[in-house]
Amino acid sequence: MSRFEYTFRKTAARPAETWRLDGKSLVSGDDLVIDLTSVKGGTFSDMPSGENWVSSLVLEHSGGSTKIACNDQPSGASRAQYMALVVALLGDLAAVSPNAAFRSGGGRVMTYLLLAVGTILSLIGVYAMGGAVLGQFGQATQFALSMGAMALIFGIFLGYCGSPWSKPTTRSPQDLLDWLRSWLHQPAA
């Protein structure tokens, strides 16, 4: 079990916060204590946003849900501390809550967003192809037909990727930890 403190900033403009792994507990400040044995699962996302990476780990536990987030440059000190906390926390969860189920990615909101964008793009593609077939675009008919077909295919692909009706893929804490280590280049414990 890890017994360490990790200090990082959620963003450069926010004050530093300290999280402590203490046996079977995750502690932040004086008022937040999470019993790791009560963690049922959660989500993890790590996405680029401009020059920074936006990272988020949401823990669903008996007391509700807790979000631990960091927005920093890939080689930033806050990101290094944040990822060290996530790796240590997943290691502890693998020992005390091995059946917890974590989803990776943007969560259900992202799936609905992808479906909406895919639907709109597909409709634009159908409109462009229909207009091209009916000769509404004059000399640009061939261009409208090809762009319409590409928009339709890409829209269907995005809608399929978003499919909010499908069951999300989940990983155990150990599987998520192994996946993280594979691209963080950290050795297994």
Image (cartoon, rainbow, N blue to C red):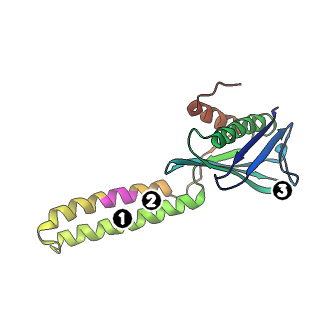
Task: Kindly report which numbered mark, 3 or 1, lies closer to the viewer in this rendering.
Answer: 3
Q: CA distance from mark 3 to mark 1?
A: 42 Å
**Which amino acid type is marked by label 1?**
Ser
State the residue at coordinates (27%, 63%).
148
| Disc 3 element | loop
Residue 104 lies left or right of residue 134; in this view the side is right
Residue hosting label 1:
122
Residue 179, relative to residue 151: is it above or below? Answer: above
Q: Position of residue 139 (x, y in %)?
A: 11, 68
The secondary element bearing badge 1 is classed as helix
Which residue corresponds to the image point at 22% horizontal and 72% vertical from the top-left?
A: 131
Residue at coordinates 21% horizontally, 65% vertically from top-left? Answer: 144
| Residue type at numbered disc 2 | Gly
| The disc label shown at residue 185, or none | none
Q: Amino acid at mark 3?
A: Gly
Of callouts 2 and 1, the N-terminal one: 1
Taking the view exactly as shown, the residue that stands out farthest to the left is 139
Q: Which residue is mark 2?
A: 159
Residue 40 % position (x, y): 76, 48
Name the mark nearer the viewer: 2 or 3: 3
- Disc 3 and disc 1 in contact, CB within 8 angstroms: no
Over which residues does the magenta segment extend?
151-156
**Callouts 2 and 1 close, C-beta under 8 Å:** yes
Label 2 vs label 1: CA separation? 9 Å
If the image is split into quadrants, where does the N terminus sit? top right
Q: Which residue is label 3 attached to?
A: 63
Which residue is at the front of the view, 4 or 175?
A: 4
